[in-house]
Image (cartoon, rainbow, N blue to C red):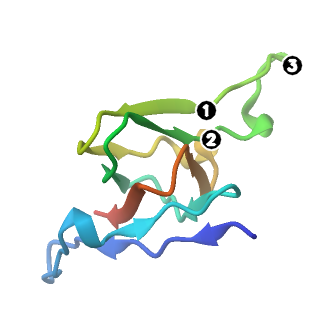
Amino acid sequence: MAVVALTPVSLANHKSATLVAPASWTAANLPDGNTIPNGGSTILGMNNSGASSRTVVVAIPASAATDSQSVTGVTHTLAAGEVKYVKLGNPGVYGNPTLVTASHAEVLLKAFTI
């Protein structure tokens, strides 16, 4: 299966947006992950709809390495039933689009731009 892009919901100050409950967000694409456009003002919503702890990794591309040091993504741990939001980092470091992978399809994702 190929990587699946998520389309962010725009939360601009000059228009309204209809937000949907975390239970109806998009299931994480396993095993290839999801990409999210990252213009520097992107927020990732993560919902663990399962009964066990799950993880989500926000990748940092190898091109962001300094002095040939390896880089690893940022791992977010979600307890059972937990919803978390994280602002994606600088697109110069995290890439645009940014790759996000989850440990299980019970993790539901939603992207927002502000």
| Spot occupied by residue 109 in the image (x, y as percentages of width and height) | 40, 60
Give the secondary structure at mark 1: loop
Q: Nearer the viewer's eye, disc 2 or disc 3?
A: 2
Q: Which is nearer the N-term, disc 2 or disc 1?
A: 2
Q: Give the camera-side residue of 37 and 84.
A: 84
Few, some or many C-alpha atoms within 10 Å of disc 3 (few <14, some 14-19, many ≥20)? few
Q: Residue 99 vs residue 37: left or right? A: right
Identify the image quadrant of the C terminus: bottom left
Few, some or many C-alpha atoms within 10 Å of disc 2 (few <14, some 14-19, many ≥20)? some
**According to the image, label 2 marks what residue?**
59
Real-space CA distance between mark 2 and mark 3, rounded to the nearest whole angstrom: 17 Å
Give the secondary structure at mark 3: loop
| Spot occupied by residue 102 in the image (x, y as percentages of width and height) | 53, 47
**According to the image, label 1 marks what residue?**
73
Specify the amino acid type for callout 2: Ala
**Contact (Cβ within 8 Å) of mark 2 with mark 1:** yes
Q: Which is nearer the N-term, disc 2 or disc 3?
A: 2
Real-space CA distance between mark 3 and mark 1, rounded to the nearest whole angstrom: 16 Å
| Spot occupied by residue 91 in the image (x, y as percentages of width and height) | 56, 49
Q: Is residue 82 visible?
A: yes
Real-space CA distance between mark 2 and mark 1, rounded to the nearest whole angstrom: 4 Å
**According to the image, label 3 marks what residue?**
68
Give the secondary structure at mark 2: loop
Specify the amino acid type for callout 3: Ser
Say if 35 sits above or below 67 in the image: below
Q: Give the camera-side residue of 114 and 98.
A: 98
Kindly identify the residue that appears in the image at 23 percent across and 63 percent down. 22
Specify the amino acid type for callout 1: Gly
Q: Give the camera-side residue of 65 and 20.
A: 20
**Residue 41: quarter of image:** bottom left
| Spot occupied by residue 31 in the image (x, y as percentages of width and height) | 68, 55
